Amino acid sequence: MAEPRRYVQPGSEAGSSATSPFGTHRAVEPAGALPQPAWKVDNDFRKIYAGELLLAVNTLNVDAASFRQMEEARRPEEAPQQAVARLVRETVEARGKQHNPVTGSGGMLLGRVIEVAPDRADFGSLKAGDRIATLVSLSLTPLRIDQIGAVRSSSAQVDIEGEAVLFATGAYARMPPDMPERLALAVLDVAGAAPQVARLVKPGSSVCILGAGGKSGILCAAEARRVGGPSTRIVGVENHPDYARELEGLGLCDKVISVDARDPIGTREAVMSANDDREVDLALSCVNVADAEMAAILVTRDRGTAYFFAMSTSFTKAALGAEGVSKDVDLVIGNGFAKGHADHSLQMMREMPAVRALFERRYV
Amino acid sequence: MAEPRRYVQPGSEAGSSATSPFGTHRAVEPAGALPQPAWKVDNDFRKIYAGELLLAVNTLNVDAASFRQMEEARRPEEAPQQAVARLVRETVEARGKQHNPVTGSGGMLLGRVIEVAPDRADFGSLKAGDRIATLVSLSLTPLRIDQIGAVRSSSAQVDIEGEAVLFATGAYARMPPDMPERLALAVLDVAGAAPQVARLVKPGSSVCILGAGGKSGILCAAEARRVGGPSTRIVGVENHPDYARELEGLGLCDKVISVDARDPIGTREAVMSANDDREVDLALSCVNVADAEMAAILVTRDRGTAYFFAMSTSFTKAALGAEGVSKDVDLVIGNGFAKGHADHSLQMMREMPAVRALFERRYV
């Protein structure tokens, strides 16, 4: 860059808005908003504010729903990858962040540290050159793109040259030295799942996973088995034949069922029959299609928990659906963040070589 | 009715679909669906199926968001009440249920028992003529309207003559003999709130209620005080001046704050300053406007709970919002049903005369 960067001391600039650990100081439209709801954020990185971490970006790991939407929005003369490259460029130019205006979702990024604001807690421990992945959504991460490289549909990744800033409250993970970066990215993308499951599963409990053969579904099944042990009954629901076969091959589930989770009555009957005609203690919805709320609710016993990781979940369909069938079930919105979730999920990968091998085949 | 009713024995009719405790046998479009997601349900009550309870309907207690939408959709020549009457009639004619196609929400109803299917668990204890309110949404309750009477905007109620059917899994409450029916209806409308709060609040915990001066907000504050006792710190956020004053008058909250819950940073600062500069253990969102998710998340401590009663909550805004600020908070979808919730909330009304008096002034 032509101009040197300048670190803005907290409260030092007359007229500059106060910096915030949440990044409100980067919101442009509307000013002062949180960076995620903001339409546009400031991606001028000649100034670095208190609490910020400046990164050189190599790869965007785009949210799957967002990536698919961009492929489908291609012009007649465009290849899907060209459309993704164009739309990513347009979005970041317009909004200062890769916040897909249609799906509302983002993704995460892989890069290396350029500069650490001296007031950060990790100043000193985090060094320029360290390779990290962000664990907060691209939908709130200020980003500038100088160049777009390869676009990979199989993993929904886009290689770029550019820079990004992480705020004081933005989580990240160092890339582990003992696994390929793309494997680590695939795991970190759904890192919240395993620790949430670890909090909920007890030995002897029964668990149903909807969409058990996908990325987060497999992590949920693996973690349920790891913390629940052999006495935990795990029923995996997976309607995609290849995914169901691969899931069975892992030997994590007591039973793998092929049924469409959008059919709540059929799913309930199949799951109960795989669980001694009883409803399960815990349902984990990892199905990335709409209208799977009722299946999760109907397979769960009274005072059990239906936990929704799927971003396709509708709040009102879940709330009114449970009420409509008088089901006293705790309905939980999957929080992508949990303390220590990155280390937790990477460690799981090390301890479960069969799961790691499947992830390497599929996502690397 | 000209034709006599006929009770259809389970499995007795060749060609008839199996009856279901969830009411799938009444789904017409698409056939076999659950009655809530179904576009249209069968409201021909000349046949009564296994598990069903037939009611004569007196009053529809329409969901507030649905009622407002219908008022606003009035034609130039219509009064708001006329528009509501017309749209209720049109909806029930088209769908066989009062399931507002714009808001997706329903409401509940007040009526009296006509007929109890002999296979029901309450056959014998529930008698023809008993007055009951349904506790499942009108959005899944088969309903026929013969006549529309008074439309009351203040309470979002519509008097009708008609009939409805409740399925085996559909909860209801008998009208209590010791309070006006309209007071009981107002309480039962938000009956899920109090028992959910009772499960979450412990003595010594800190609680923030967003929208604390509304119907469900007041019930949450009352229950938090009742189960938490004097050692529980309750901060009520209420931006409507009259509601804030009335809430203060009840003496339930340690502090009532007037701030817009759509301003997450401002709300966080005000709530923390009312709680010794600490985040709260539990946030209850009863705000019926969009974009209040982040306020609930930002006021809550790590490993605390943000509980969303508001139907205006967005699943993705809550999930991505918490992740975006790296908040390890349990995010819960308010389930309108909890075991014993009707008796629980009515009993609370008896034990808290000041709350009862306010509800009688406002909602009766």
Image: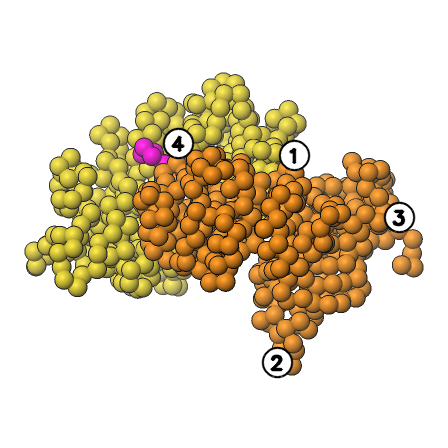
Chain colours: A orange, B yellow
Q: Which chain carries label 2?
A: A
Q: Mark 3 points at which residue?
A: A6
Picture quadrant of residue B24:
bottom left
Is label 2 in a helix, a strand or a loop?
Answer: loop
Check disc 4 and give the amino acid type.
Pro
Check disc 3 and give the amino acid type.
Arg
| Mark 2 nearby-residue class (10 Å; few <14, some 14–19, many ≥20) | few
Q: Mark 1 lies on which chain?
A: B
Q: Which span of residues is magenta-colored? A: B337-342
| Mark 3 nearby-residue class (10 Å; few <14, some 14–19, many ≥20) | few
Question: Which of the two discs, 3 and 2, labels the residue nearer the N terminus?
Answer: 3
As drawn, is A179 to the left or to the right of A324? right
Q: Where is residue B301 in the image (x, y as percent from the top left)?
A: 61, 32
Is residue A187 visible to us here? yes
Q: Could you tell me which quadrant the N terminus of chain B lies in? A: bottom left
Which dot marks residue B195? 4
Q: Which chain carries label 4?
A: B
Q: Position of residue B296 (x, y in %)?
A: 56, 39
Give the label, 2 or 4, closer to the camera.
2
Is label 3 in a helix, a strand or a loop?
Answer: strand
Which dot marks residue A76? 2
Check disc 1 and give the amino acid type.
Glu
Foreground of the two, A228 or A207: A228
Q: Name the residue under label 1.
A: B269
Q: Could you tell me which quadrant the C terminus of chain B lies in? A: top left
Question: Which of the two discs, 4 and 1, labels the residue nearer the N terminus?
Answer: 4
To the question of a shared chain for discs 4 and 1, the answer is yes
